[in-house]
Amino acid sequence: MEYLLIRAISWFAQVIMLLLMARVILSWFARNPSNTVGKIYQVVIRLTEPIVEPCRNLMSKFNTGMFDFSVLIAFFLVDIVAMVLKLLVSLIF
C-alpha cells in the first residue's frame, strides 16, 4: 500500500511539473490562440493556473521587474509538497 501511494504521489507531481514546463515552452510559441499550439497552450494554462496563480500573487509583493518567476516557484513548491507527502506516507505506513 505504501509503495502504491508513493508512486501515485510521484506520478501526479511529475505530471504537474511536466505541464508547468510545457506552459513555459509553449508560451514562447503560442501567439495565435486559434491555431493548434495556441489551443494546447490554453488547455495547459487552464490546468496549471490554480497552481501558478497563488505563486504569482506571492511574487507580486516582491519587485521582480518584468520577470515572472511564478512558474518556477510553483515548480519547486510541487516538488517540495510531493517530497513531504511521500515522507508522511512512509512514516504512517
Image (cartoon, rainbow, N blue to C red):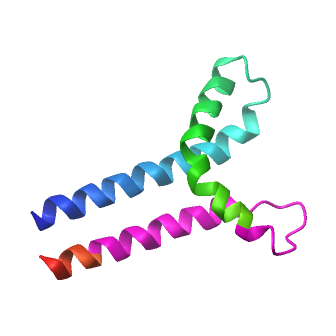
Which residue is painted at 25% across and 55% down in the image? 8
**14 horizontally vs 39: left or right:** left
Q: In this view, does 16 lie to the left or right of 28?
A: left
Residue 33 picture location, percent across and down: 74, 23
Against 23, residue 51 (above or below) is below
Residue farthest to the right, as pictured: 65
Q: What predominant SS class does the magenta segment belong to? A: helix
* Residue 64 percent location from the top left of the image: 85, 70
Q: Is residue 28 above or below residue 52?
A: above
Number of marks in picture: 0
Q: Can residue 49 be seen in this view?
A: yes
Q: Is residue 41 above or below residue 80?
A: above
Classify the position of the C terminus by image quarter: bottom left
Q: Can residue 21 be seen in this view?
A: no
Residue under the point 81% across and 73% down: 61
Dividing the picture into quadrants, the one containing residue 60 is: bottom right
Q: Which residue is drawn at 52% across and 45% down?
A: 19
Asked whether residue 69 is drawn in magenta, I would say: yes
Estimate the x, y position of residue 92 in percent, counting from the top left: 16, 79
- Is residue 85 shown left or right of residue 65? left
Q: x, y percentage for residue 41?
A: 64, 33
Residue 40 is a magenta residue: no
Q: Quadrant of the N terminus?
A: bottom left
Furthest toward the bottom, the residue is: 91
Q: Give the range drawn in magenta.
A: 58-86
